[in-house]
Amino acid sequence: MTQAFPTTPTLASPDRRMGPRDIQTLLLASLGGALEFYDFVVFVFFALPLSHLFFPPDTPQWLAQLQTYAIFAAGYLARPLGGIVMAHFGDRQGRKRMFTLSVFLMALPTLAIGLLPVYASVGLLAPLLLLCMRVVQGVAIGGEVPGAWVFVAEHAPRGRVGFACACLTSGLTVGILIGSLTAAWINHHLAPADVLRWGWRLPFLLGGVFGFIAVWLRRWLSETPVFAELHARKALSEGLPLRTVLAGHGVSVAISMAVTWMLTAAILVLILGLPNLVQKSFGIPADEAFLGNSVAAFCLGLGCVAFGWLVDRIGAAWALIAGSVALVIATYVMFGDLAAGGAHFLPLYALTGFLVGTVAVVPTIMVAAFPAPIRFSGISFAYNVAYAVFGASTATFIGYLAGTSGRMAAAHYVTITAAVGVAVAVWLLVKGRGRAELTTE
């Protein structure tokens, strides 16, 4: 019989405030996550110079950019493979080992991209090497995000899991902001010719160096108390943890995929995709669009922490309902203002970015959805597969909606996914799992 959620509410840690050791763990995990996510997304901020340098000079510009974005997308397609493999060993051999390995696997190819020869030097080998490095980055991020959520959740005291997961999620979003600001600084201070000659290498070299610093910092982290307890009791998963997930926890997988869909829509549409959308569909100047994006990304980090605090006080289900409804309202108000000329675009985008912080509720729901022996594998499979599927289909779905609703299509898409999130929250309340408690069983 398919089990929806673990039924034994044995918590990972006793009730207590977060002490210095908890805060150190959270800071080191969040810093590493921010640097690793920066390494993963900085590629897209330099897609234009990469398209010039890594493909034949006679390639049409549109085709070169398309090929560069295809290489970027390859990182997303590699996420499920990396996540599943790393989660298997995380459930069998320890969370800390995979948590450290993931940041190392991200730092190495990021540094290598900054040192790669371009097409003019080695011909077709250049884009092939770039593709290989991007695939390794995808493998790393596939293990990092689920592993980070499991790691901080299993370290957190009871009643602080929502805040811990949200702070980690906030750290990941800070990585997006760092990438955006780095790209803006380089493009502002260097001439276009210098960016093409050598400037494009700087963000990758810096990302690689900082990544290795993060590897060194993570050596100070300790194994999670939950995994240590499982190891001591000889209660680790036997065989393939993923097989156990698929055989007995189908409802948990479905719920985790559903809330991941909401997460991908909010991040991809309202944070990563909106600057280009408002320029193309509403005539917002590029400078204003990207300024708004930076402000929204900053507010997103704050929103994540706020919603994590809310989870620990009213429960994950009610926090998800409140955040989803508020996000839908703010999104329609912002798009309505854009349709009227965008006079209040910046403050409304800041508010919307803050409410996108609702996505910080998602990891709390997922870590509670699976029992500890298979938690890493369950989250990794559901999150990475859903992210690959929904991330790849977002543009197509919005394009379909645009045929009937025009410039409001993106707002309608976010509303659909928010409704899915509310449905999950209601299901949790009906099943008495509204607080989404972490278990060790």
Image (cartoon, rainbow, N blue to C red):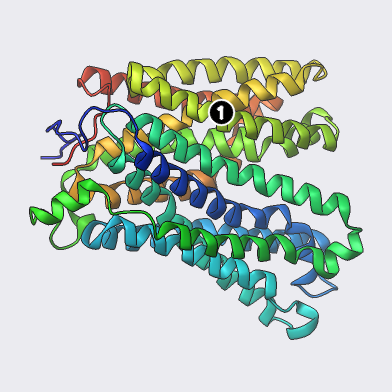
Q: Is residue 294 above or below residue 234?
A: above
Q: Residue at x 40, y 37 (%)?
A: 165
* Image quadrant occupied by the C terminus: top left
- Going by the image, does 58 lie left or right of 31? right
* Image quadrant occupied by the N terminus: top left
User: Which x, y percent locates residue 151?
Assistant: 33, 47
Residue under label 1, please give it.
302
Question: What element does badge 1 sit on?
Answer: helix
Q: Residue at x 66, y 14 (%)?
A: 333
User: Which x, y percent locates residue 245?
Assistant: 21, 49
- Going by the image, does 407 lie left or right of 111? right
Is residue 182 visible in the rendered image? The answer is yes
Q: Residue at x 85, y 73 (%)?
A: 58
Q: Nearer the viewer, residue 165 or 42?
A: 165
| Outermost front residue | 20
Q: Nearer the viewer, residue 310 or 412?
A: 310
Q: Is residue 339 above or below residue 117?
A: above
Counting labels gives: 1
Residue type, mark 1 in image: Leu
On the image, which quarter does residue 96 sit in?
Answer: bottom left
Q: Nearer the viewer, residue 257 or 434?
A: 434
